[in-house]
Structures are given as structure tokens and as C-alpha cells.
Image (tube, coloured by chain):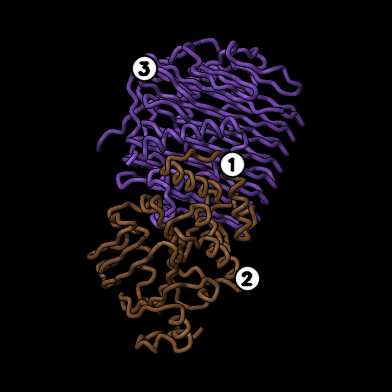
Amino acid sequence: MLSIKNLHASVEGKEILKGINLEIKAGEVHAIMGPNGSGKSTLSQVLAGNDAFEVTEGEVTLNGDNLLDLETEERAREGIFLAFQYPVEIPGVSNLQFLRTAVNAMRKHKGQDEMNAAEFMKLAKEVSKQVDLDPAFLKRGVNEGFSGGEKKRNEIMQALLLQPKLAILDETDSGLDIDALKVVSDGVNALRSEDRAILMVTHYQRLLNHIVPDYVHVLAGGKIIKSGGRELALELEEKGYGWLGIKDDDTSN
Amino acid sequence: MKSVPMLSSAFLHPAGESLPEPLLALRKERASALVDMPLPTRKTENWKYSSKYLKLADDMAISLPAEGKTGNSLAVPGYKVVFINGVMIPEASEYPDLDGIEILSFNDLANDEAEALPAKLGSTLNHDQVQFARLNGARFEDGLLIRLKPDAVLDQPLFIIHETSADASGSAYPRIYVEAGANSQLTLVEEYTSSGEASALVSTVTEFNLADGANVTSIRLNMEGENVQHIGATGVLQQRSSRFESHCVGFGGPLRRHDLQVRLEGEGAETKLNGVVVTQGKQHYDNHTSIDHVAAHCNSEETYRNIAADQSHAVFNGRIHIHQDAQKSNADMNNKNLLLSNGAEIDTKPELEIYADDVKCAHGATIGQLDETSVFYLVSRGIGRRQANVLLTMAFINELVQQIPVEAVRETAQARLSDFFEQTFQEA
């Protein structure tokens, strides 16, 4: 589904990704682990199309089509979804209005009828229950005054509404207490399906206890330096990133 | 030394004579005081950013005739008074006879009724700051006197539609005087619209005199066309425990100026001023507000937002003056501005003068652009870039639009804002 070949990317002239190669097939769950500053978030942002990052070399295809040629919104409509590490607060735009606009943009792209306010409200209420968000949140500004955990649940709610082909979860576990982690993981597991791929980006392996990946990759210095199965994450937890010769001040968890 | 431009004497010629005698006399007196009135230049502090937009030609001195279509009069969910070019049109107006509430055209006043007016007209304004209110005083052809007896409550909003109909060049001088008796209550909507293409000047004065405990909501919707230069002044005097709330929504034009002056003269008076301005193309809009805390224990809260697109220019000047005896004053002024293009200009200036020592006074002003992170967040969900821009721009003013307490006005404002977005954010 997603094919990344020799991807190089920089921000403000500084090269962050230095040749990433990764193949993700439909139905698979991949985890990318790595210390701070290894390029994990940059990879997520580049895939989603943040033009603050410049791709200097390499190619990325989604089901054979060149992803890098597409605008951010076109990538989203083709099925790329990024759950943000730091979801943005947008006072003045209600969560409901935002979600409905997004869902309808997607439906329009697929040639489906747009949902009216009442239909969408019904759907949104159901999905908000699934991630344990009070429907009252729908009326508030996008992420406005949400706690860290509420913001992350709102991200997963969006994924459930938009039903992407590839969901990229950027540090989705950060800032979550154990209950919230469980809710978020249940939401992500509900997304797992044969025709969908999930790419999790995380510093810690804690999330992987709840969402069990098929493959684990270690990213360091802008490159994937080791790939393996589930057991690689456990080994990393036990031995720390130092085990792979990576310097990291913050691997104890 | 370069000579200072003066108001052309053409503007001082006598106008129509249908007003009652005391008002004709007042007008004449005010006109004689205007001889050699200097026009504002960029050296005039309160017109610094706006004088270049003022373009008065002699042919605009002529009073526009009180005739013309009343336009596509929107379905007004309340009482309605229609003015064309500053003169009331009774057949287009609809308001019932109400107990305790008088709504009278100046032209219909008997001489003895009109005798009390000259002392009142202009009494709420500091004319040094609103030079053009004087011109209105010298030129008004008619006006509206609204008197609420103590405890009178107007059960629905009163809409005053001021239409400028300019098939030939000229000017109009709408005038409103509201006397709200003790504990009376009123919501007044002033809607300024226009038809015709000839260049016109509209100089307005609206005054509110609130007795103890009166509660007045004023909504001002400025939607005149590209041929109209608008200079308006609103004066508010508030006595003890009265409450005034203002919602101004303005769309730019070749020259748009509104001065809003509030004097809190009685203890415990409260005022809340909200304003939204959007400008595009080469449009201009200038809001000058001034709040005088004269008495102690008064509250004022002011929130203005400007959005400027293309090469347009918006100005906000907010003055708060806390007088020596106004202890325990609470004043909060906030002005946020959004620039939608590199060619647009916004000037904002808070002016605080505080002479009392036990007060709370906060002010804040910001100028920014659409937040790229927010745009990225929205488009990463499949929302088109244009729509994301519209959502975020609307979000900037939504809070204020939602606070407008009359639904029909909110809808009119929203519809006009949609047009603004349509033109500002082109489809990619």
C-alpha cells in the first residue's frame, strides 16, 4: 500500500530524514520507534504533506500513485490520516462543524452525497461514545480547552469518522493516563482491518502492549537502523536504545 | 506654509425648510459655526490614517432628495422606520402606537415639542473629536426622536433602515435621538444601506441618553455601497446603573468612519461595545471609540475585531479615560486584527488616560495572519484550503457575530460575510 524509497527531507535547510526505506501492506500494523530527534515526527509530517518540510530526494507511493505530488488535502482524500502529536486548538470553529466539513469533503471526493446536520450529529454521537468523549465536546471549539487525553481521543474519533487507508499515529500515547490509553488503543484496534494499514510512531513501547504491531522499526539519525517483529520492541524496552548504539537521554520507561 | 483645506462653503448652503422652527434655528446656528471649518488632514491626530480617503466634491454638498426605492427591504421581525436620504418615509414604516413609547419624526413635531430638542441634540458628544457631527447638525433634514417613559419596555427590536439613494451626487444627514427613561428597555437596530451609483456622503449622528437603570442595546450594521462615504457618530450618556450594549458590524467602503463615544456619568453604569469590521479590495474602515469613566463603580468591556484583505485598510482607535473620581472602575479593551494579505494594512491604537488610583484597566491589541498550523490541521483532514481559510477567518469573528442578540441581523451579517469570503478566497 505505502512504499517509501530512499526518502530524504529537511527543514530550514537541515536534513532530518536521510534515506528512509519502508514497505507497508494493507492490513499491517507497523511501529516506528526511536529516541527524540531521530526524525519520527518529521516522517509523519512529510507523509501528511506539511510543506514546512522539504523532500529533497526519494519517492513515496500510495497504492502505486506518487504521494509527494499531491496537496495535503488530496492526500487526506486518498486515505492518508495523521493523528497529530499536538492537535491544534481552533477556537471559533466548533468540533462538530469541523468534523462534518471534513467528512463531507471526503464523501464529496468519493462521489457520495453530503451528510446533513442531523444525519451527521447522529453519527458523531455514536463515534464519540466509542472513544468515550462526552457529546458535549462536539459543540466546543476544535480541541479548545481539551485535556491532553481528550485531544488524543478526538484524533482517534476523527480517524474513525474518516476511515482512512493509512492511519499514521504520531506519539498518540504521550500524555495519556492508563485509562485514556486503553480507550485510545481500543479505538485504534477498532480501525484495524484487512484493507487498512496503521503506522505508529512512538518513543516508548507502552502503547505496543495495547496495539500489537506486526513489525517494529527503529529510527535513528534519520534512517531505519533495525527492523523486526514485536519482540524487537520488548528488547528495546529491556535494554534501552543504548543497546543499539544510539545515544538517548530518555529511554527509561 | 501650506494652507489647510477648508470645508467648502457649498456644504453650508441652507437645506430644506420643513423642520419645525426651533430646529431650523438650531441648524442655522450650527451652520454659521462651520464657516472655515478645517478638513482633517494626516496631521489631524484623530484622522491620521483616514484623511486620505475623504474626498468631498462640491456636487456632493447638495441634499439628496427624499425619494427613491426603499430597496430590497428585508423582512424585518420587529418595528420598522425607514429613512431615505435622512428623511423619514411614513408609508414604508411600520410601528404601532405603544404605551410609554414615542417614535416621532422631527418633521412631525409641533413647535412647542421641538423647543426642548436644541438643548439635547449633540449633548452626548464631544464635538472636538467628531468634527463631522457638526456638519450633520447644520444639515439634517429630518430625524427620529425616540422617547421611552420610565419602565417602558419595547417588546421587539426597532429597526431603523437608513437608505442612501444616490442617482445623482449629494449628501444625507440621518439623525436619531433616543431618550430612555428610568428602567426602560430598548433594542435598536440601525441598518445603513444604499442604492444608486452616484458619489454620496452620509454623515450620521445617533444619540442615546440613558436615565437610571435604563437598558439599551444598539446594533449598527453598515452595508452601504462603493459610492458612499460614510462618517457616523454615536454618543451615549449613561446614568446610574444603566446598561448599554453595542454591536457594530461594518463592511468596508471608499471611506467608512464611525466614532462611538460613551460617557459613564452615574455610578454602577455598564457598557459593552463589540465591533466587527471586514475590508477588501481597496476599501477602508475606521472605528474610533471613546469611553469616559466619569463616575465610580462603572464597568466597560470592549472587543473589536478587524479583518483586512487585499490592499484594504482598517483602523481601530480605542480611548479609555478614567476620571479622577471614577474609583473602582473596571475597564477592559481588546482589539484583535487579522491581515489576510501582505498588501493590507491595519492600524490599532489604544489610548488610556487614568486619573484615579483604584481601578482595573486592561487592554490588548494584536495583529496577525491566519495560523499556518491550523490551516495544515484542517487540510490534513481533507478540507480544501479555501474552505479552511474561510473557517479560520470566520472563527476569528464568530464569537462576536454570535453575540448579536437579533437573529435577523446575525443572518444578514453572515450572508454578507459569506460574500466577503467568496471574493477574498478564490477557488484554487
* Disc 3 packing (10 Å; few <14; some 14–19; many ≥20): many
Chain A shade in the render: brown
Determine whether B165 is above or below A4 in the image. above
Chain ID of residue with mark 2: A
> Residue beneath label 1, please?
A119
> Residue beneath label 3, please?
B169
Label 3: which secondary element: loop
> Residue beneath label 2, please?
A179
Instruction: Identify the residue shown where x is 68% and y is 43%.
Output: B266
Tell me, yes or no, whether dots 1 and 3 are on the same chain.
Answer: no
Q: CA distance from mark 1 to mark 2?
A: 30 Å
Determine whether B316 is above or below A229 in the image. above
Label 1: which secondary element: helix
Asked whether residue B257 appears in the rendered view, the answer is yes
Question: Amino acid type of disc 2?
Answer: Asp
Asked whether residue A8 appears in the rendered view, the answer is no
The quarter of the picture where residue A50 lies is bottom left
Chain ID of residue with mark 1: A
Q: CA distance from mark 1 to mark 3?
A: 53 Å
Label 2: which secondary element: helix
- Provide residue A126's location: percent of width, then percent of height: 62, 52
